[in-house]
Image: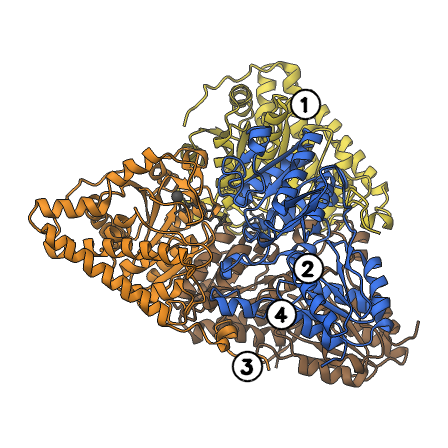
Chain colours: A blue, B brown, C yellow, D orange
Amino acid sequence: MAVIEMREALNQALRDEMKRDEKVFILGEEVAEYNGAYKVTKGLLDTFGPKRVIDTPISEAGFSGLAIGAAMMGLRPVVEFMSFNFSLVAMDQIVSNACKMYYMSGGLYNVPIVFRGPNGAGPRVSSQHSHNMESIFAQFPGMHVMSPSGGYDAKGMLKAAIRCNDPVIFLENELNYSQKEEVPDEDYVIPIGKGDIKRPGSDVTIIAWSRMLGLARKAADELSHNEIDAEIIDPRTLKPLDMALIAESVKKTNRVVIVEEGHFYAGAGAQIAYDIYSNLFDYLDGPIVRVTQSENPMPYAANLEAATLPSVAKIVKAAEQVCYRV
Amino acid sequence: MAVIEMREALNQALRDEMKRDEKVFILGEEVAEYNGAYKVTKGLLDTFGPKRVIDTPISEAGFSGLAIGAAMMGLRPVVEFMSFNFSLVAMDQIVSNACKMYYMSGGLYNVPIVFRGPNGAGPRVSSQHSHNMESIFAQFPGMHVMSPSGGYDAKGMLKAAIRCNDPVIFLENELNYSQKEEVPDEDYVIPIGKGDIKRPGSDVTIIAWSRMLGLARKAADELSHNEIDAEIIDPRTLKPLDMALIAESVKKTNRVVIVEEGHFYAGAGAQIAYDIYSNLFDYLDGPIVRVTQSENPMPYAANLEAATLPSVAKIVKAAEQVCYRV
Amino acid sequence: MEGVKKKSHLLSKEKLLVALEKMMLIRAFEEASIKANQQRKIAGFLHTYIGQEAIAVGVLDHKLPQDSAVTTYRCHGIGLTLGMRPHEGMAELFGKVTGCARGKGGSMHFFSKEHNFLGGHGIVGGQFGIGIGAAFKSNYEEDNAVSFTFFGDGAVPQGTFHETMNLAALWDLPVVFICEDNQYGMGTANTRAIANTDIASKADAYGIKGYTINGMDFFEVHSKMKDIVAEVRATRRPVLIHMKTYRYFGHSVSDAGLYRSKEEVEAYRQKDPIVHVSQEMIENKMLTEEGLKELQKKVKAYVQEAVEFADDSPEPPLEELTQHVYFDEVGE
Amino acid sequence: MEGVKKKSHLLSKEKLLVALEKMMLIRAFEEASIKANQQRKIAGFLHTYIGQEAIAVGVLDHKLPQDSAVTTYRCHGIGLTLGMRPHEGMAELFGKVTGCARGKGGSMHFFSKEHNFLGGHGIVGGQFGIGIGAAFKSNYEEDNAVSFTFFGDGAVPQGTFHETMNLAALWDLPVVFICEDNQYGMGTANTRAIANTDIASKADAYGIKGYTINGMDFFEVHSKMKDIVAEVRATRRPVLIHMKTYRYFGHSVSDAGLYRSKEEVEAYRQKDPIVHVSQEMIENKMLTEEGLKELQKKVKAYVQEAVEFADDSPEPPLEELTQHVYFDEVGE
Ligand SMILES: Cc1ncc(C[n+]2csc(CCOP(=O)(O)OP(=O)(O)O)c2C)c(N)n1
Ligand SMILES: Cc1ncc(C[n+]2csc(CCOP(=O)(O)OP(=O)(O)O)c2C)c(N)n1
Ligand SMILES: [Mg+2]
Ligand SMILES: [Mg+2]
C-alpha cells in the first residue's frame, strides 16, 4: 500500500469521484491553474479541464450560491474554501440555502454539495485566520459535518461526502496535509456517521478529531508510562455522532476527555459531553473534562499561540485528572 | 410604575442612552421613517433626527462594517437587524472584525457596538426566518451575548449593552415585544453577566431565557399542582454566564432542566449543561435534561411548527423526568 | 445600455387570452389570499404580487421547459405563471400537506420541480446565486437553457447582486437578471437605498447589456423580452433588466403603507396591466365585455375551487416533522 | 469617469527627499522582513509591498492628522508611510510585545492609533466597511476628515466592495477608495476574476467619480491625488481610484509565482518608482549619486536598528494571553 500525504489522499478521492460521476465538479479560489493553495487539487485541471475544475474570483457568497443552484439542478459541486475562515462571508448561503432547501421545498430540491477546505488554526496566522467551524455548522439541521484526522480516513470520508445527496461540511486541517500514511489505491468509502477506535485502551476515553488526534496519540503514549491506558475515539463525523461507538468505550473506561482545537463555549465537545452525560450518566466515575482553546482570539506571537491551543501536556493533564492521578 | 410593552422599554433605553451620550446612534433597515419593523425605534427619528437615526439599504455586511469602523473611531453604534436571521449575511463582519479587533490590534482599538434585533422563531415564518443565534455568537471570545425575557430586564440590560465598550449581541424576541410589564421610568442598569431568579423553588432548577421564560413560568405553575416546586433561573446574559447564581440554585435543587428555543446540537444549553456538570457534578441527582427545538428546519405548517418548538408540556415532562415522577 | 424597439400586438388573440387569464388568475389568487389571511387561515408573512402581474406573465411566456426561474418571497405570481395550480399554491399558504412544498415552506417558499421553479426565497439577495447556478448547469450540460432570476429593487444594494453579476458576466452564464423595481423596499423608497437608481446602467460595470422596461405594460414587457431572451439563449451572455412596476398593496399584509400617498397608488392603478390588456383586446375586437366578465367568473371560480381544496386538505402528518431534513439516511 | 491633468515636479526638493526616503524605507523594511522570514524569525504569512511603494507614499502625503487609513494584510508600506517606526513594525513581525499590535496581530495586522491607521486586515473585502465607517464618523463629528480605504484588485468581485461603494455614494461619505491593482489576486490574473477590468468605470454604477492612475509613477500619483483628496474633502463625495501597479515578489513569501513570466516582472522592475524618483531628482540636480548612496545607507541602518530592536525585544508575557479580549471587566 502506498504511503502518501493526506493532500494526495484527498486528491485521489476527488479524482476517483470525478471519474465516477460526470456531474461532480470542483470550484474555488486557486483550485485550477495554481493547483490549489495547499495543492489538494493538484493536477485536476490537467485531467478534467476547465469545465470541471474552476478558478473563482474572491466571491465566496457568490460561488457558494452558484454551487447550490447547480446542485438543485442536479450537478454535484465540491466547493473549496481556501480556508474555512472565508466560509463566514458565505454563511448565509450555506445556512439559509444549502441547509434548508430540501426541507422548505417539501422534499422537491435536495442539495448534493460538499464544502471543503482547511479548518482551524494554520500556524501563526493570527485572529482572523484561525477559526474552527465545526460547532457552527453542526448547529443547523440539514447538514452533515465531517473532519478527517489522516489520509486513510480522508480519502474514504471525502468519497462518502461527495456521494451524499445532502450538504456536507468537510473540515480538513492545513497542518495535516503533509502528514503521511498508508492509503490504498482502490476505491473504499467510510460512511458518514461512523467513528473509529484509533487506540484501544481501558482507563480513559479520549475523544479527538482532525489535528487533535495526533496530539491525543502522543498523549496516550505519555500516559502509558504512567500506567494509564487511554482509548482514543475519533468520531470522524461530528454530525451525526457515532454515539454507539462512544458509548461502548465509555462503558468500559468510565472516564472521558474531549479534545477540541476550537473554542470552549458551545463547541462540538460541549454537545458530545452532553450526549454522553445524557445516555451514560451512571457509567461515569466523574465529570468529563474538555481540552479546548483558551478563551481569546488567536494571537500571532509564538508563545501566546502555543498557550492558546490544546497541547499534549494539556491532554495528559486532563486524562490524569479524570483518572484522579492529580 | 408604568406598565408598558417590552418594545417600549427597549425604546426608553435607546432614548435615554442617546440623550446621555451624543456618540450613540442607531442604524438599520426601517428604523427611522418607518419607526422600526417592530416599532422598537418608534419616534426616535423625530427626537434625534436623521443624523442619529438612520435608515439603511439592505446591506447588512456593509452597514455592520460601517458601524464597526465608526466604533473604532469612537462612536457608539447600535445596529438593528430587522431580524437576526439577516445577521448571517454580516457574519464575517461581526466575527472577524467586531469580535477580534481589540485583541488583534493589541488593545489599540476596542469596538463599542451593540447588534440588536429579534432572534428566534417569529410565528409561522418558516425555515429561513427562524434562526436562534445565541450559541453561534457566544462561540467566539470577544463578544458578549444578552437576551432579555421581559420589559424590565430589557431596559436595564440594553443600557448596560450600550454602555459596554465591547461588542454586545443583544437578542430580543418578536413575540415578547407586545408583552406588558411594570417598567420604572428612571435610569437603571442590569449589568452584563448577572442572572436572575424569576421564581424561587426547591425541587428543580429550570434555566430559561428570552421567550422561553414565559413557557417556563407556565410550566412551573403546572408543576406546582403536582407538588413539584420549580426554581426558574434566567441567565439573561448567555456569555458570560452567571454560574454563581446557577450553582446556588443547583446546590439546592440537585436537578436541572435547560430550556432553549434554538437547535439542539451545540446550543447554549449544551454549554450551560457542561459548566454545571463540571462544577456541580456531585450535587446532581441525575442527568440534566434539555428542552430544545426538534432537529429540523422550521416548518411553516401550524402543527409542525408547534411540534418543532419547546412547549409548556415538554418542559413539564422534562421537569417530571428529572424529578423521577415519570 | 440599449433599447429594443417596441412591437405591440404581435400576439395572437389566443396567446393574449391566455396571458390575460393568467394575469387575472394571479390577481384573483392574491385577493383570495388576502381574504384568507384576514380569516386567519394564512399566517406569517404574506407578500402579494398585485400590480406586478405583467412582468411574470410577459417575461415567462418566453420560458422553455428546460429553462428555470427563481425569485424572492413575492413568489406567487411567478409560480402560477409557470403553471402551478392555485390549488397547490393556496394549500401551501394554508399550511396543508397538499401544498406545493407540503406546507413546510409557506407563502415565501413556493417551489415547482416540474417547472424548474427553484423557489421563492426569504433572504433578500439570497436567490441570486441559485439563479446563476442554474445557468451554470445549463452550460455544463449544454441544454441551451436560460435562467430567469427575479429580484426586487431592495436587493440591488446587497453584495450578492454584485458578486453574481460579475460571475455571470465573467463566465458567460445565460442569466436574465430581472429587477422588479416596485420603487420601494418595505417602507424605503429606492432613492433612499440605491445610489444611482438607473439600475439598467449598472450592467456597464460588468460589461453586459442593460435594458429598462415599463413593467406595467404587458405588451412592452412581452415584446422586448422576446428578443432579449432569444439573445441570451443564443449568446450565453447575461443581461440586466430594469422593470419599472408598482405594488398596489403594502409590502406585506401587515404594512399600513404610510410612506406613500393615496394619489401615488391611484396613479399606478390607472395603469393597471389587466385593465390595459383587456381594454386593448376589446378595442381590437379580440374580446367582448361579456367575454371579459366570463373570464372573470371562470378565474374566480377556479380560485374558489383552490380555496376549498386548501380548506379540505389535511395538515402534514406529524411523521413529516423530521422528513426532508436529509435525503439520505446516515448514522444509526 | 474623469482624469486630472498631470502636474509633476511641483514638489519641493525637501518634500521629494522625504518621499524618496519613505519609499526606500519601505523597500528596505520589506527586504529585511524577507530575510528574517528565511531565518525563521517571522512565521505565518508575509505579504510584501515591494513595487507598490509609490502608491502609499504618493497618496498619504495628502493625509491630514484627522484622516484615517485602512488596508489589507499587505499593510507594512502604509503603516511605515503613516509614520510608524520600522522598530514597532519589525517587532510585530517577530511576534514581540514591543510590536505595534503587541505581537498579537502579526504581519497582516499592523495598527497605529496615533496615525488613525485602522489596520491591516486579513479577510479580502473585510476592511471596506471600516473605511466607510471612519468617513461616517468624520461627517458625524464634522471634523472634515477623509478616509483612505485601500484594497486589492482581488477584492473588487467581493460583495462588500459594492455594498460600501453604494453606501458611501448614497450618504456622501468622504471615502477615497483606492484599488491597488497589481494585476493578480494570488495566482489569478484580474482578467480571470473581474468582468470589465476598467475598475475606475465601476464608479458610474454609484454615480461617483472614478480615476485611473499609473501607480508606478510617484509624480503622477502624488499630483493627481492632491486634487482628488482636496475634492473629496470639500465635496464629501467618495471617489474610486484605480491604481495600476505591480508586486515584484510572490503573493506571499511562500508563492513561487509560476503564473507570471520573468519578462513581465522584469518589465515592471524597469519602471521601479524608487529608481524613477531618484533619477528624476538627480537629473534635476536635487540629488547627487553620493547623496543617494548616503540615503541608502541611512535607511538600511535604520532598518537594521529596527531588526535589532525586534530581536532584543521580549515575547508578550503570558499574562497577555487573555488581555485585550474585552475592554471592560464583566461578570464574576
Ligand atoms: C438579508 C435580508 N435583510 C432584510 C430582510 C427583510 N426584508 C424582507 S423584504 C424586504 C424589502 C425588500 O424589498 P425589495 O427587494 O424591493 O422587494 P419587494 O418586497 O419590493 O418586492 C426586507 C428589508 C430580508 N428578508 N433579508
Ligand atoms: C474572503 C477571503 N477569501 C480568500 C482569502 C485568501 N486570500 C488572501 S489574499 C488573496 C488574494 C487577494 O488579492 P488582491 O485583493 O489583489 O490583493 P493583493 O494580494 O494582490 O495585494 C486571497 C484569495 C481571504 N483572505 N479572504
Ligand atoms: Mg421593491
Ligand atoms: Mg492584487
Q: Residues within 10 Å of mark 1 (few under 14, many from 20)?
A: few
Q: Chain of mark 3?
A: B
> Mark 3 = which residue?
B188
In the rendered image, residue A117, in percent from the top left (x then y), is placed at 60, 48
Task: Identify residue type, mark 2.
Answer: Leu
Choose mark 2 or mark 3, whichever is in front: 2
The residue singled out by tag 1 in the image is: C65
What's the residue at 39%, 60% (across, down)?
Answer: D119
Q: Quadrant of residue D211?
A: top left
Secondary structure at badge 4 equals helix
Quadrant of the picture in which ligand 4 is shown: top left
Task: Identify which residue is drawn at 42% across, 52% down.
Answer: D128
Judging by the rendered image, the residue that carries numbered circle 2 is A213
Pick the residue in front: C98 or C235: C235
User: Disc 3 and disc 4: Cα gap in Å?
Assistant: 15 Å
Mark linked to residue B6: 4
Q: Have a look at marks 1 and 3 and say if they share a chain.
A: no
Q: Is residue A323 above or below residue D301?
A: below
Q: Secondary structure at mark 1?
A: loop
- In terms of depth relative to the viewer, which is nearer, B185 or A314? A314
Q: Nearer the viewer, mark 4 or mark 1?
A: 1
As displayed, is residue B95 above or below residue C36?
below
Three-letter code for the amino acid on which mark 1 is drawn: Pro
